[in-house]
Image: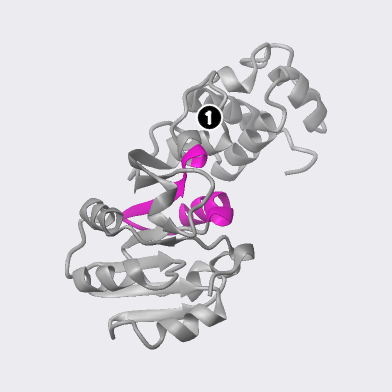
Amino acid sequence: MRRTRLGQHFLTDSSVVDKELAIAQLSAKDIVLEVGPGKGTLTKQLAKNCQQVIAIEIDNKLVDYLQNILPKNVTLIHADIMKSSWDEIPFFTKVVANLPYQISSPFTFKLFKSSFQKAVLIYQKEFAERMIAHPGSKQYSRLTVGIAYKAKCCIHQTIPPQSFSPPPEISSCLVELIPFSQPPFYVKDESFFFSITKLLFSHRRKKIRTILKNAFSTSIPEDIMFGEKRVEMLTPAQIGALSNDLFELKLFLKKY
């Protein structure tokens, strides 16, 4: 039933499921989004603890299987979450999922364009460590900056490969995300901020002034803030301040 191209590693460890439920703190009023329900191990436990589960599954064979085993308060949708707009997905309050690893980054950024109270997600360990990395570390990335702007992030535990069938090559982590009601630092234009962050980390070993000179259609002031630094040494708030300065100068990127 497993398809390698879909990155399917089915969770079999009931203790991990119990931990997910404990972190999610579900109530009878919660509507939970689950992406990649697999064989329904987590889905059935979610259904016992909330009002409704919205389960999104891309694999048609798994959809056929799940239709026969899931309780009535599970709405099973056969779709690719990455090709679906949030308008096409029913309302949900929380997200609990063992994500297919290959959509970890795009789904996380997509999720922040929706409205939710909490997400409890399983990621590859390397990815999870990038989410909470510190400036100057090898793991520090645009993902780190995006998470720092959007949500409180906590790694609760490391999950060994043996908790899945078949076991992945590396360990995973159980991560909790709680979106900020207000970001911890101010940006004047969110889209521009994320574009600047992506640009800078695409050339993380170059000085910021050099990157900006090549990226903008107009000249960059010689005294641009942090011009002599590399992005990997800047905090998320400093990157936000730089993007604000560039946005205020009404400079236009050659490409996003």
Q: Nearer the viewer, residue 14 or 238?
A: 14
Q: Is residue 82 magenta?
A: no
Q: Badge 1: how crowded within 10 Å, few (<14), some, or many (20+)?
A: many
**Start-end of magenta stretch:** 101-127
The residue drawn where x is 23% and y is 57% is: 18
Dividing the picture into quarters, in which one does residue 150 lie?
top left
Say whether residue 29 is visible: no
At mark 1, the secondary structure is helix
Q: Nearer the viewer, residue 188 or 202?
A: 202
Residue depicted at x 54% and y 42% = 190
- The residue at the point 33 percent across, 82 percent down is 70
Q: x, y percentage for residue 248?
A: 62, 30
Q: Is residue 22 above or below residue 205?
A: below
Q: How many marks?
A: 1
Residue found at the very far bottom of the displayed protein: 68
Percent x, y for residue 27?
17, 64
Residue 26 placement (x, y as % from top left): 21, 61
Viewer-nearest residue: 57 or 246: 57
Question: In the picture shown, does residue 130 fall above or below 238?
Answer: below
Residue 164 % position (x, y): 42, 57
Give the answer, above or below, for where 131 lies relative to 207. Answer: below
In the picture, which quadrant includes the C terminus?
Answer: top right
Work out whether residue 178 or residue 2 is closer to the camera in this orientation and state it: 2
Most extreme residue toward the left, as rendered? 28
Give the quarter of the image for residue 191. top right
Q: Is residue 162 above or below residue 209?
A: below
Q: Is 106 included in the stretch rendered in magenta?
A: yes
Q: Amino acid at mark 1?
A: Gly
The image quarter in which residue 40 lies: bottom left
Give me the residue at 67% from left, 15% from top: 227
User: Quick check: can you spot residue 1?
Assistant: yes
- The residue singled out by tag 1 in the image is 240
